[in-house]
Amino acid sequence: MRILVTGALGMLGHVLCETLRDAGHDVTAKDLPELDITHVPACEAAVAGHDWVVNCAAFTAVDDCETKEKIAFEVNAVGPAVLARAARSAGARLVQISTDYVFAGDAGTPYDEDAPLAPRSAYGRSKAAGEWAVRAEHPDALIVRTAWLYGPGGRNFVTTMARLAVERDSVSVVDDQRGQPTCTLDLARYLTELIGADPPAGVYHGTSEGETTWHGFAQAVFETLGHDPSRVLPIASADYPLPAPRPAYSVLGHRRSDAVGVNRLPNWRAALQASAHLVVESV
Ligand SMILES: NC(=O)c1ccc[n+]([C@@H]2O[C@H](COP(=O)([O-])OP(=O)(O)OC[C@H]3O[C@@H](n4cnc5c(N)ncnc54)[C@H](OP(=O)(O)O)[C@@H]3O)[C@@H](O)[C@H]2O)c1
């Protein structure tokens, strides 16, 4: 299939392009400055001739979004709307990548794909608006929410912990936020399978199996890379204040993946063990 990937130089985008090509697809990779997803004529021209569009472009600096909410909405809501409209007119299906931050994070059991949205941060509001805009412009679109991403080819939580393990005696990491660390390699495989299945429109959750805290994730990074995990100390979010509030509970359920017969992603710990060395060596 002919597939346009936007945001193709980003952490997810570049891995997805490679995975789709390995699966035999004809991939067009676009990112800034060549393609700005908020630019209508550029998007119409870029989308033409493709069967699918996967939008990995986003303004992802969560804390910066608090003071730059207008830019966040431009990139995370208007951009997806522009792409969705262009894709619909060109007869292409669209996958919009979204986030666990669209939820309040105060649940105690995994969020269902149809759970009500209640974002608590500017980033979350802009991504929730992006979901709504995509559904309005392109009723046949897919929205794939992911979370806690890491992967090869850039800085992320795993590479930061690998660096701190060498630089410091101990590292303090929050232990009261739960989520699903997810490797871009696994998410890219999931997205490739999902596209191949040509599934019904709507929301899908592309996150690892299992759950942990950032502290648990950090300890697992230390352990996998041969460092003593007891050097990672637990702290509360209140002791590590950030501009944007983080969801305390960000675990997503996988009901719709099961319903369409698309394989779930692997368990987060197994995925980390399989990828950590590659991720760290890629920066
Ligand atoms: N990272 C996570 O933990 C995480 C968690 C949940 C969901 N997600 C979602 O997953 C998707 C991919 O995230 P990621 O971590 O791969 O993000 P990323 O590394 O920040 O990549 C985003 C890419 O989009 C580009 N971009 C920004 N504005 C654009 C515009 N107006 N037009 C075209 N391209 C533009 C960026 O270019 P510049 O670098 O030049 O700005 C960058 O190359 C996003 O939808 C994100 O919201 C990520």
Image (tube, helix red, strand yellow):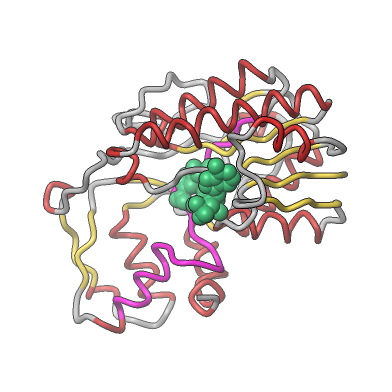
**Along the line of sight, the residue nearer the viewer: 24 or 105:** 24
User: Quadrant of the image for the N terminus?
Assistant: top right
Residue 223, given in percent of the width and then of the height, sits at 38, 75
Tell me the residue at 48%/76% (across/down).
280
Residue 74, given in percent of the width and then of the height, sits at 48, 32
Q: Is residue 185 magenta?
A: no
Q: Is residue 151 magenta?
A: yes
Q: Quadrant of residue 184?
A: bottom right
Give the magenta-colored segment's residue range.
Answer: 142-165
Number of marks drawn: 0
Tell me the residue at 19%/75% (across/down).
170
Residue 212, given in percent of the width and then of the height, sits at 36, 52
Residue 117, given in percent of the width and then of the height, sits at 42, 22
**Along the line of sight, the residue nearer the viewer: 44 or 228:** 44
Up/down of 39 relative to 229, above or below? above
Tell me the residue at 77%/54% (across/down).
20
Q: Quadrant of residue 235?
A: bottom left
Task: Answer left or right for 86 relative to 125.
Answer: right
Task: Answer left or right for 48 relative to 16.
Answer: right
Task: Answer left or right for 5 relative to 272.
Answer: right
Is residue 80 visible from the viewing direction of this image? yes
Task: Answer left or right for 258 relative to 250.
Answer: right
**Along the line of sight, the residue nearer the viewer: 272 or 95:** 95
Is residue 182 visible from the viewing direction of this image? no
Tell me the residue at 38%/48% (across/down).
61
